[in-house]
Image (tube, rainbow, N blue to C red):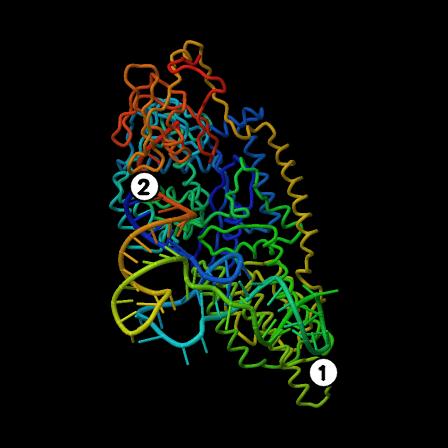
Amino acid sequence: MTKYYLTTPIYYVNAAPHIGTAYSTFVADLVKRFKKMEGFEPVVLTTGSDEHSRNVEKAAKAADLSPDEYCTRMVTEFTGLWKKLGIDYDHFIRTSDPKHHETVRWLFERCQSNGYIYKGGYTGQYCVNDELYINDAKPGDPCPECGRPTETVTEENYFFKLSAFQRRLLDLYESDPEFVKPDHRRNEIIAFVQQGLNDLSITRTNIKWGIPAPAENHHVFYVWFDALISYMSAVKDDNLWPADLHLIGKDILRFHAVYWPAFLMAADLPLPKKVFAHGWILFEENKMSKSRGNVVRPGPIVDVTGVDALRYFLLREITFGQDGSFSYDALIQRYNADLANGLGNLASRTLSMIQQYRGGVIPQSDGLGEIAEVARGTTEIVLDAFNQFNFSKGLEIVWAFITVIDKFIVERAPWKLAKDQDHHTQKLLDETLYTAAESLRIICGWIYPVMPASAQNIWEQLGMPEPMANIKVADLHWGKLAGGQKVGKVLGVFPRLDAAPAIAKMQELETSEKSRQAALFATTPAVIVPTDSKISIDDFSKVEMRVGQVLSAERVKGADKLLHLKVDIGEPEPRTLVAGIAEAYTPEQLIGRKVVIVANLQPRKLRGIESNGMIVAASVEGGKPVLAGFLEDIPIGARLK
RNA sequence: GCCGGUGUAGCUCAGGUGGUUAGAGCGGCGGUCUCAUAAUCCGCAGGUCGCAGGUUCGAGUCCUGCCGCCGGCACCA
C-alpha cells in the first residue's frame, strides 16, 4: 500500500475563513477522496492555522486576549466551518502547538549544522501588516503591498543561505516538471530564481509571539520559516514525510516552490512531490478583500444550496489553476441546469420508474452494451482528468454522459414499453431500467470525490449496501449493480431553486454571518494597525514640507509609475524630483500645479535620476495616489507646520 | 520597461503539425413526450474568429506591427 500525504495551506488567523479558504480546502478534500478511490493507503490530509506574527500579537492585545486565546477563538471558526462543510481532514496543526515548536527548532539546527545559517544584522523598513521587509525603502515610506506606513527596524538576526541553492532549485524545476504546477507558474518561478536569490532573514527579535530559536530565546522565527514546517510537524510521528502534494493559492507560491525546498535541501530532508497553485476566487469579477467589503462566506451559501452545490460550482465553473468568479446568479444557474435538471432529475426519473414498473426491484439484465461502452470510456477520461487536477473537464464529461442516458431513456420510452406485456418488450424494459440504474450508480462513483454527500444519498436510494467511502475505482466497472436489489426510498436530490428568493436568502444570511463574526472579533483592528510609536513635536519639526509649483514634468523612460518633475519651491534652482504618480496624473495635468514637497529628504537615485525630495500624496490600498493641495492660494516656498 | 499568457456566438469556453458550410455547454426562441424536480428530448439561434498588413492555391490555425486584458519581475507614492 502506498501512502498519500497532502496539505492545504495553514491559514493565517487574521481573518475568518471565506470562500477562497474553503476552495483550497474543498479541493484538498476532493483529492483525498479520489486518492483513496485509487487505492492509496493511508491518505492523510493536513490543514491548520498559522498563528505567530506581530499582527496577531497586536490584535490579541487590542482584544484584551492572550495571543493563544485569540487564536483559539479564530481556530474554532475554521474547525467549525470545516465540520459544516464536511471536510475529511486528519490533522489540524496549529503553529502554536509544542510539537510544532520542537520540529521547527530541530529543522533549524539541521540547517545550522550543515552550514546554511549565519548571523547577520539588518536595518531597514518593515511592514507590520504584511510581515514584510521592504528592500530599498527609506524611513517613512509606505508598504508597497498595502500602503500602510512601514517601521524602521534594526536588529541582529539569523539568516538562511538561500543564495546557495539557486543551482539546485533550478535543477529541481528542470528535472521534475511536475514539481510546480500549473506550468505557467513553474515558468514564473524559474524566471524568479534565475534572477538570483538573496539570503533570507529568518528570525526576529521584536516579536514575542513566536517560536524561540534554540539557544537564543530572544530570537523568534520568522513566519515563513515557522509556517512551512508545520507540514512536517503535523505528521512527524507518522512516517508520512515527504508530502505528495501541497495545495496552495497562487499568492504563496514562492514560499512553497523556492524557500521551502531550499530549507529542506539545507536540512538534507526529502522534498515534497508537488506544489499546485490555484487561482483566486473573484466575486463578480473583483478581487475579494476586507477593505472592499465584498468577502463572501461559504456558510450562508451552503445553508441554501447545500455543501455539494457549492463544491460542484467551484470545481465545474473554474478551470483549476486559473482565477474564477463566484456570483450568486451563476451559482443558482448552474445548480438548476446541472444539478436539478440534470443529475437530480435523472436520479428521480430512473428510481421512480423502477418503483412503478418493477415494484422497486432492480431488474436482472446486463444492460445495453453500447451504453456500457460509453461508460467505460467516460471512466477513463474522468480518472485521467482528475489525476491531472482538471476537475472541470472531468465533471464536464460526466455531465455529457448524463445527457446520453437522458437521450437513451427518451428513445426507449419505458412508459410505452410498460404498457405492452409481450415477453420481448418486457425484457427490453428490464434492460432499459437496468441500464439507467447502473449508469446512475457509476455516476455516483465519478462524482463522489466532488460531491460526497449527494453521491452517497443517490447511492442509498439505489439500495447499495456499502458506504461510498469504501468505493474503489474497480467499482466503476459496468455490471456491478446487482439485479434483484431493492431500491431505497426515493427522496430526490437537488430540488429546483427559485433564483430570486434563494439569492435573497443567501444575502440575508451573509449579512448576519458577517455581523456575527464582526462581533466575535470586534476589537480586532479592521484596517489600520496602530503604530506603537508616537513622535514629539521636535521630531515633526524636523520634516521640512514646502509648497512648490511644478515647472516641468515628463515620464521616466522604462518605468510605469515614475514622473520626472522640476519643482520651484522658492529656491534659486528648481528641485529635481522623481515621483511615482504616473498612473494617476499625466505630465500635462501637473505643470503649473501647486504641490507639497518634503524638502529635506536625503537624495535618492531612481532610474538613474537623483530625486531631491518627495511629493506628498494620499493613497488607499489598491487606489491611486492623490496629491495634497490647498483650497486657498498660497505662495511658493511656504512651509507646512 | 522586460518576460510570459491571452483576445472565437449574449455568457463560459473547444478548436494537434494551415484545407470542404468555425464548434460545445448555458441562456433565449419554437416544438415534443409524460417516467421525472414546469424537468427530458428535438429544432432554431448565423459570430469582421481583437485590429492592420504579410506568407500561401488556401489561415482562428504561420509571420510582422499595433491595440486590449491577465500574470511574473523590475519600479513606486
Above or below: residue A560 compared with residue A452: above
Q: In what element is the residue under mark 2?
A: loop
Residue B72 shown left or right of residue A25 in the figure = left
Q: Where is residue A3? Give x, y as percent.
A: 44, 56
Rendered view: A568 above or below A386: above
Amino acid at pointer 1 = Ala
Residue nearest the observer in this picture, B77 or A50: B77
Instruction: Please tell me which residue is depicted at 70% across the width and 83% down the height of the picture.
Output: A416
Q: Is residue A90 above or below residue A514?
A: below
Picture quarter with the N terminus of chain A: bottom left
Residue on which disc 2 sits: A267
Query: Please, which residue is most extreme toward the top here?
Result: A538
Q: CA distance from mark 2 to mark 1?
A: 71 Å
Where is mark 1, residue-wise? A418
- Vertical relation: A592 (above or below) A427: above
| x and y percentages locating residue A329 in the rendered image | 61, 53
Q: Does A556 sit left or right of A378 as displayed? A: left
How packed mark 2 is, by other alpha carbons closer than 10 Å (few <14, some 14-19, many 20 or more), is: many
- Coordinates of residue A627 in the picture (x, y in percent): 44, 26
Q: Chain of mark 2?
A: A
In this view, the mark in front (2 or 1): 1
Of label 2 and label 1, which has the lower sequence position?
Answer: 2
- Structural crowding at the residue carrying mark 1, measured as other residues with C-alpha within 10 Å and reported as few (<14), some (14–19) or many (≥20): some
Please name whichever residue, A28 or B40, is drawn nearer the observer in this view of the structure: B40
Q: The residue tagged with tag 1: helix, strand or loop?
A: loop
Residue at (58% x, 65% y) in the render: A444
At 69% from the left and 73% from the top, the residue drawn is: A486
Task: Identify which residue is drawn at 52% across, 49% down.
Answer: A25
